[in-house]
Image (tube, grey):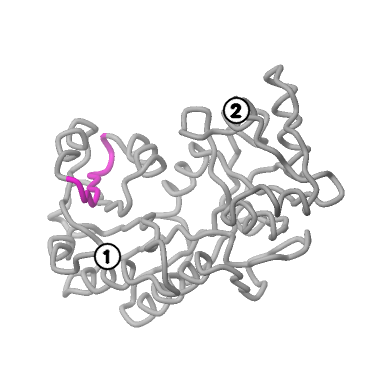
Amino acid sequence: MPSRFRKPRVLLIGYGDVAQRMAQLTSGRWRVAALIRRTDQLQAVREQGVTPLWGDLDQGPSLKRLAGWAQRVVHLAPPPGEGLNDPRTVRLLQALSGRTRPTQLVYVSTTGVYGDAQGEWVRETRALNPQTERAQRRVHAEQAVRSWGRRMGVRVSVFRVPGIHAADRPGNLKDRLLRAAPVLVPEQDIYTNHIHADDLARLLHWAVWGALAQRAYNVNDATQARLGEALGKLADALGLPHPPTLTWEQAQATLSPLVLSFWRESRRIDAQRLHREWPWTLQHPHLWSAY
């Protein structure tokens, strides 16, 4: 490690809930910076012990200050809301391509890149099959970071993450039950894949040191159930009614295209590679154990 760095430097791109949880884990041991787009957030970020670096992934010139700042980068920022590519990731990689490059970049992707597996188990070796523009943008970002890592000699790791939940996140699963949001009838229901935000933050804390180069990792908790069954167990734990059920035909007539796009894809995410390389213990192994 270069002697001019008294503490390891880590740069967080996309300073949302998970990144903030990760920053809390590193408090006092790493020097953490975060890319911040809104100037009214700068002081609040400083108060969290994080160095704010103003910049906007939609404005390439604003990212120049990122060059050479950190040895490790964790990229959690989402792509734009439309199109088939992720120009934000491309601009970030251009900004990091100076003379002093990071040694490690961790990209947080989505299990949506696999598309519909019809309920089958999905390992990292499965061919990607994005079935929405949202997932296609993620595939483009994955390809961009991995290609960049090979060209630049930077260790790049990709983490494919399912739905993130926690009791203190907006729109959490308890709120979903209170809203009586429906699920599909059991014979048509999809398998659920989730990870608690605290477990994901711990995973990323490890990833900047332990993840292997050019490696993709599936992320998932130990819940192996269809969505309605998992939410039913959570409802029992909380003393709440089970969610109402719809047939697929009823769902098509009443629900938004966004919700339907998720319900068209069913897969069971196999995260054994991650557990073999880092034998971590989940703090929240099941949906119903976290509320």
Secondary element at image label 2: helix
78 or 209: nearer the eye?
Answer: 78
**Amino acid type at image mark 2:** Lys
- Above or below — where is 130 with respect to 70? below
> Measured from the top left, where is residue 126 in percent x and y?
67, 72
The region drawn magenta spans 28-38
User: Residue visible at 70% across and 63% down?
Assistant: 122
Residue position for label 1: 102
User: Residue visible at 51% across and 69% down?
Assistant: 133
User: Residue visible at 68% across and 54% down?
Assistant: 263
User: Residue visible at 35% across and 63% down?
Assistant: 104
161 or 244: nearer the eye?
Answer: 244
> Measured from the top left, where is residue 238 in percent x and y?
67, 19
- Above or below — where is 110 with respect to 149? above
Q: Which quadrant of the view contains residue 95?
A: bottom left
Residue position for label 2: 174
> Measured from the top left, where is residue 248 in percent x and y?
77, 53
